Image (cartoon, rainbow, N blue to C red):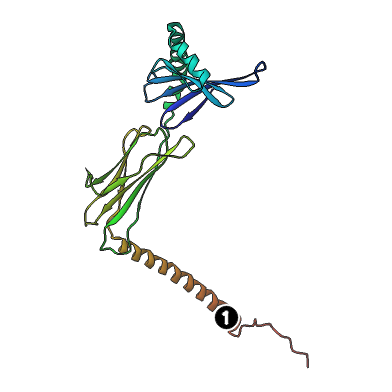
Amino acid sequence: MMACLQSYLLFVVMFSFFTPTDGHFITTLDLCYYRGEDPHDVEYIWRAISDMVKVMEYNSTLNRFTGYTPTGKHKAEQFNADPVVLASFQTPLHFFCKYYGALAYKAGLNSNVEPSVHLRSMTPHSDRHPSMLTCSAYKFYPKQIRVTWLRNGQEVTSNMTSSEELANGDWHYQIHSYLEYTPTPGEKISCMVEHASFTEPKILHWDMSLPESGRNKIAIGASGLVLGVVFAAAGLLYYNRRKTTGGGGRELVPTSHPSQ
């Protein structure tokens, strides 16, 4: 049994065999599609494939067979007219999908993975234009998540966009939400993320105590201070070395005079 996760949970059982009499390679698939968090909301599909060509398929929702080749259409017509055959294909729906499949399905649903949430600025160079904040959640499971923006504790409903939940390809997802706003003194902007892995919503606050230009000036000033300390230390070391060597760049070596 193997499982793959997309917008639904799917369990697959596959049987393949070779028929030496007519030289065909036959494959049958038993598929269970779980469409929600209720393990009994499941659709059973039986599919017959001959030499990589789909021949016939049974759908538990329709309780009917569908043929795709001349032979498959003929057999599907016969099976649809036989109540015993149709009833027999309801058995794997209840036994395989709703019983055994549901056990693994519930185990998968209980494996919640907490998202890593990041809040950053995409502010333009000019402070006269609106700013852009990005709130991103990475590597979470299950897929269902809610990302909202708060302004002074109240939900923001305008000037915001959000991506869909994007599959990473490893059963994890990511999502990105964007807020366009004009910085206002004293205003608190926050990103709130709600997910099954959290016991309570996770809220990240954006520090707007200084405009972006002010933060840049502080960063530049701090860098200049560090460089000044480095150069001062280098100058002090150079001065001490010159003093030790007598100022001429050469070390003073004691000399002995020949005895008279």
252 over 128 or under it: above or below: below
91 and 65: which is toward the camera? 65
Q: Residue furthest bottom?
A: 260
Percent position of residue 63, x then y: 40, 15
215 over 23 or under it: above or below: below
Q: On the picture, is 172 further left or further right than 181?
A: right
Q: Residue furthest top?
A: 84
Q: Secondary structure at mark 1?
A: helix
82 and 145: which is toward the camera? 82
Q: Residue furthest front?
A: 70
Percent position of residue 45, x then y: 46, 20
Q: Quadrant of residue 229?
A: bottom left
| Residue shown at the point (44%, 29%) measured from the top left | 111
Q: Quadrant of residue 185?
A: bottom left
99 and 33: which is toward the camera? 33
Q: Amino acid at mark 1?
A: Arg
Q: On the picture, is 6 further left or further right than 131?
A: right
84 over 109 or under it: above or below: above
Q: On the picture, is 146 further left or further right than 101?
A: left
Q: Which residue is mark 1?
A: 242
Q: Quadrant of the C terminus?
A: bottom right
Q: Is any part of residue 89 visible from this angle?
A: no
| Residue shown at the point (44%, 67%) measured from the top left | 226
Percent position of residue 126, x then y: 30, 64
Q: Quadrant of the N terminus?
A: top right
Percent position of residue 11, x then y: 48, 23
- Callout 1 environment at 10 Å: few (<14), some (14 to 19), or many (20+)? some
Q: Is any part of residue 167 visible from this angle?
A: yes
The total number of labels drawn is: 1
Q: Quadrant of residue 209?
A: bottom left
